[in-house]
Image (cartoon, grey):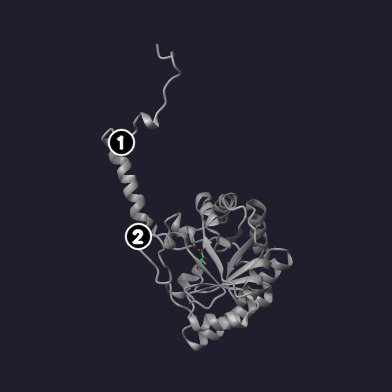
Amino acid sequence: MKPTIRALQQKKARSEPIVMLTAYDYTSARLAEAAGVDVILVGDSLGMTMQGHATTIPVTLDDIIYHTRAVVRGAPQTLIVADLPFMTYQISPEQALRSAGRVLQETGAQTVKLEGGVFMADTIHRLVQAGVPVMAHIGLTPQSVHQFGGWRVQGRKKSEAEQLLKDARAVAEAGAFAVVLELVPAELAARITDMLPIPTIGIGAGPHCDGQVQVFHDLLGLEEAFQPRHAKRYANLAPIIREAIAQYAQEVRRGEFPTMEHAFNMKEGEVQ
Ligand code: KIV
């Protein structure tokens, strides 16, 4: 049965870790569901992993809708969170309602995620009042990477940590059903996790969050050039895939593929 946001909150109450993974297409979503993840995030990290951009900023609402539709078809029994991209919700709560409405109506995803703490609390409240479940995202919020001046851990200094505590409290009070903590010191993430009634989902936030999220390509070693410190490679698929493609190319060039094993014959007696 498809888990609900309530099921995630019950997991927190039972201290059962929540497993979230990104996916961006039908095939990866099918694999993630078959592996038993609790939540699939159609993250705007697709700007990097699927589109080759340097940041999430160029991702559009139509991009998210396109990828989320495919993910929903691949993982019909998994809770799906779709990211709201940069500038599709920051301008006003009305804009956020319109964007979230499109995502839920056009994709079949059940929930949306947006970045921001205290300053997004009103918007979260309006969305929740309108029946849209919202996952919040604080700490290093990638849509603000230029404002932060890079992919830096947030909350190392006392003043930053105090702001993050305020952000966490604000999104929970506004009605978010969970909050992603990205690149936050482990002690601070533990404190936020203890303090909040809603689940925290960490990425680069240490082991004390209620759940963890990882990016599909990082987990499977699909991007060879770069591995973030917060990611662990559970497989190293890039060389395996490259080698398989190279072998295919070599066999075609040598006339070794296809053989008749992969070909078809005309019906008996028809050749003459
Ligand atoms: O877009 C994304 O993949 C995310 C995760 C890193 C949390 O927001």
Q: Is residue 20 above or below residue 244?
A: below
- How crowded pointer 1 is (Cα within 10 Å; few <14, some 14-19, many 20+) is rated as few
Q: Nearer the viewer, mark 2 or mark 1?
A: 1
Mark identifier at residue 147: none
On the image, numbered disc 1 is attached to which residue? 252
Q: Residue at x 55, y 61 (%)?
A: 37
Q: Position of residue 156 (x, y in %)?
A: 46, 84
- 220 sits left or right of 26 in the view: left
Q: Secondary structure at mark 2?
A: loop
Q: Position of residue 129 (x, y in %)?
A: 73, 67
**Which quadrant, please, contains the N terminus?**
bottom right
On the image, numbered disc 2 is attached to which residue? 224
Give the camera-side residue of 90 and 197: 197
Disc 1 residue type? Val
Q: Position of residue 155 (x, y in %)?
A: 49, 82
Disc 2 and disc 1: Cα gap in Å? 26 Å
Residue 31 visible in this rendered orientation of the protein: yes
- The reply to whether discs 2 and 1 touch (Cβ–Cβ < 8 Å) is no
Disc 2 residue type? Glu
Say how many tags the image has: 2
